[in-house]
Image (tube, grey):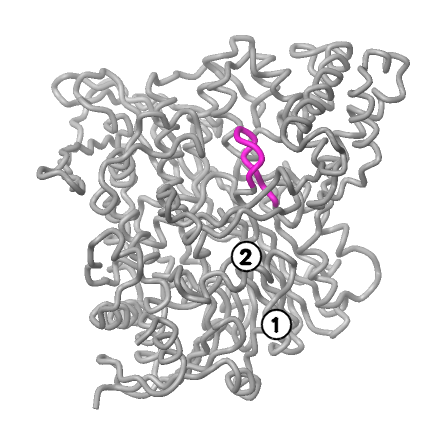
Amino acid sequence: MTRAAGNRRRRRGRLRVPGLRSDVEVLYSEGHVPHLYASSEDDLFFAQGWLTASERLWQMDFLRRAAQGRLAEILGEREVAWRELTILLRGRTTVDVDHLLRLAGIAPAARASWPLLEPATRRILERYAQGVNARIAEGRLPLEFRLLRYRPEPWTPQDSLAVQRALAFELAPTWRAILALEGLRAAIAAPERLAALLPIASVGPHPLVPEAARLAALAAAEEHQTALGGPHVGSNAWAVGPARSASRAPLLCNDPHLPLTAPGPFFLAHLAGDGFDVAGATLPGLPGVLIGHNREIAWGITLVLAQDADLYTEAIAADGTYRVDGGRLPLEVERTEIAVRGRATKVIREIRRTRHGPLLTDLFEPPHETASGLALRWTGQEPSREMDALLGVNRATDWSSFRAALRHHGAPALHFCYADRAGHIGYQLAGRVPRRASGDDLAVRDGATDPGWASFVPWEDLPSLFDPAEGIVATANQLVVDESYPHHLTHLAEPPWRYRRIRSMLGGERRLTAEEMISVQLDLYSGWAERLTEALLVPLAAEESGSILTQRGKEVLARILAWDHVARSESDGAALFYLFHDALVRELLEEALGGDRLRAWLELLNASVVPIERLLVEGKASWLSPEDRRAACARALDRAAAAITQRLGADPAGWRWGALHTARLRHRLDPLRPLRPLLSPGPFETGGDGMTINNGHYVHAEPWEHRVGAVYRQIFDLADWDRSRVITCSGQSGDPLSRHYRDQLPLWAQGDYLPLPFGRAAVERAAATAGRLQLAPPA
């Protein structure tokens, strides 16, 4: 049977699946989106596990291995592709990545969470795992298993919990930020100069652990290997109340921003049966729907970027003890064996723990030769009940039951936007946010004297909002509280540019439509670029000192000033502005910080944006005078002119932002260059920047590839679920040989959406052309 015929068989007819107890109907809608109808909860989630594994088995297995720290088993010991991410990755290997992931405690925390879950949740996880294993037992493994020559192990319910916890670790920004900021503290002695570059006010003396830079390298290596995300991935979500909606019902929109991968991180599905009727984006490896709607409510999520971790210096003695106040305590020591493909013997590493957490410095052999260690405490290391929360949200019918479910959510801390059919909208922050007795600086702490976290912010104190008078709630990773809030949330919230633009586009007195929500999600206006242009370049053009500009600098300046600050892919002004900004940052900071430290700081994505903007716009005498700023801008314009000529030629007709700013959906085996055209779609031109609603984020340390974007978009009008619109960045299949591997990409790239029917009649109409499959128990 050909692969194409196999795909048709999967989508039509009747298929017997061992483990099912009664029939499950699978009706497909456009885009190969399955709608599962089961008579029991047991069969619904068994079928979800089987169907998801049928499309995304290797992706699931890879994420599970990442969570367990077992990537070297299939990849061998190879150097991480550091040139694609950071200069700090030189010499680091997949074995180091596995060691880091084990040190993080992802899999142990997942196992410890299992007994805390509700019996009904454990049963759903068990049936989902049985469905995955039924698919594994069928054979016909995806291409990646054949390329790497291995077979997947049986799936367990705890594997699902580990995949969720691995995602939480990838979305934990704090410990990476602390390491990068320690590099700045080491480079800049003057407190006032350092203060201008930090996202916080306090810059008091803090210890710098010698291994900090190398640990930062491993943080980035782990991000690359798991391809889940990293610090300062973002998202947009908003809800519009019925008084502002043309349909007289709420509107709810969400577009999570994560690394652009193939396949994408989400799998679209509709699950109906025995108390569940929910549709939207699922995470391969987890039962239920992560983002979407049921019959009564809809929800979207964005990341809080909470200060969810701390690092502690620990004074370690040769006898295996460490200092605590006036005494000493013994380290907890665990030996871990890392299997490496192609090696007959396993690599032996140690995981040593203090009262604060595991010692990250044990990533470097031999660990016993150092008198200091760096311990990590992270909210995700503790057992929690995220799956109770997720499935509770799937079943929620109103604001009260929605919030009751979210009480169980631990890591990562998330913003939730909410809407319901009764006409209500709301916002809730959910997750564990530490309360510290010793201040909230982003700095390494003294493990001997710092007691750690006093507690977590109480649920009742977490920010929440219900039916605000203006009829809008919105989140874009911005700080959602002001100085009057009694608890500390984060120093790492995203710059406010996306949030401000969303509120601006939703403002006014008109009633908003679902069609208008499309224009909001696709908006490419950059308020950040406009602010910098107005502050730096408009005065330069107006001043008599404009004579300091060269002729080509004046030409570049004129094109940037003629730009409307909409970062379209075809814009020459956008291309020149981003080249100018990059050149200006390097003019000001490269010599002071050194190339490696500057690159490490810029690799924190948007963490550097606000300090640099503040330095440039407000002017800091410790860094530059007004005259210095004018001269630096003039030189940066010249450098932009030279760069665009070198990259795109001397003819301005070929100067386009999209010619510099391209995206490629990276498969996790993307480093295998001969297979790249098959596995990783692209490159293709895109617009936007990291501050536009339609996120076009590039890593400032390694411009200009579009790395982070809206991997999924949803627009719901609660007046009619059948009018729902969704799209992912790739396609439903994880098989590179399937026509559904990348079939949503053209729609996504041009700003189109797929319908997501919900009522049975609408789904039946869609299945008449898209296909249907009957899953049945064995004869």
Per the rendering, the mark at residue 199 is none
Q: Image check: 448 left or right of 332?
A: right
Name the kind of residue labelled 1 in the image: Ser
CA–CA distance between discs 1 and 2? 19 Å
Task: Answer above or below: position of 247 versus 164.
Answer: below
Q: Quadrant of the C terminus?
A: bottom left
Label whose residue precedes the other's in the sequence (1 or 2): 2
Q: Is residue 525 above or below residue 376?
A: below
Q: Is residue 405 visible?
A: no
The residue carrying mark 1 is: 724
Judged from this view, the residue extending furthest toward the left is 344
Q: Position of residue 2 (x, y in %)?
A: 33, 73
**Could you tell me the amino acid type at mark 2?**
Phe
Estimate the x, y position of residue 199 in percent, counting from the top left. 57, 28
Image quadrant for the N terminus? Answer: bottom left
User: Where does the image place residue 408, in percent across and percent down from the top left?
Assistant: 40, 58
- In the drawing, what numbered circle is on residue 416? 2
- The residues colored magenta run 696-705
SS label for mark 2? strand
Q: Is residue 404 magenta?
A: no
